Image (cartoon, rainbow, N blue to C red):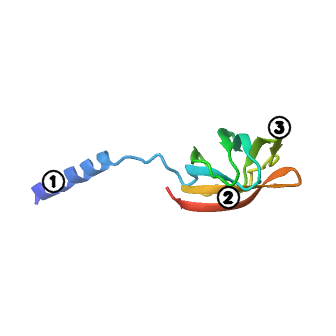
Amino acid sequence: MKKLYVITLLLLLICCLSCKKTPFSPEGPTDVRIRNLTGSVLTETLVRIKEEEIPFGTIDINNTTGYHRFRTAFSKAYISARMNGDTISTGPVDFTYMNYFGQVKMTYDVNLENNRLTIKNVTLDSPL
């Protein structure tokens, strides 16, 4: 009985020591990409979510970028780009009371309305 107790304790200790904490949290990371629905080529595209800022480069008409990883992502983001020589953006975003998406891959569908970029739709593509 004593041997069984010691063996069980050793197995439990080995299991506890071999466990690793994953680098994921409920907030993220989130993989984000952009689909250009503006009808024009977007150049120097930049996405800012909270304090994180990642350049996405040039996005052709009706094309989608590759995924870029953010610590967190929300239904809105600050997106700026150059289009036909002019800089346009979605405008400032207040993330204070927004809910995060969590550990997913997502797509922002970006459109142009009144000479301003807008996020027309957010698509959750798949879990990470």
Mark 2 and mark 1 in contact? Answer it, CB < 8 Å: no
Identity of the residue furthest to the right in this view: 114
Q: Residues within 10 Å of mark 3 (few under 14, many from 20)?
A: few
Q: How many marks?
A: 3
Q: Nearer the viewer, residue 75 or 60?
A: 60
> Which comes before the other along the chain, label 3 or label 2?
3
Taking the spot 57% from the left edge, 45% from the top edge, the residue there is: 69
- Three-letter amino acid code at disc 2? Asn
Label 2 element class: loop
Q: Which residue is mark 2?
A: 99
Mark 1 and mark 3 in contact? Answer it, CB < 8 Å: no
Q: Which residue is mark 3?
A: 85
Q: Which residue is mark 1?
A: 7
Where is residue 82, by image quadrant?
A: top right
Taking the spot 58% from the left edge, 45% from the top edge, the residue there is: 68
Taking the spot 82% from the left edge, 41% from the top edge, the residue there is: 84
Label 1 element class: helix
> Which comes before the other along the chain, label 1 or label 3?
1
Q: Nearer the viewer, residue 17 or 86?
A: 86
Q: CA distance from mark 2 to mark 1?
A: 46 Å
Q: CA distance from mark 1 to mark 3?
A: 72 Å
- Residue 86 percent across, percent down from the top left: 84, 39
Label 3 or label 2, whichever lies nearer to me, is 3
- Residue 2 percent across, percent down from the top left: 11, 56
- Three-letter amino acid code at disc 1? Ile
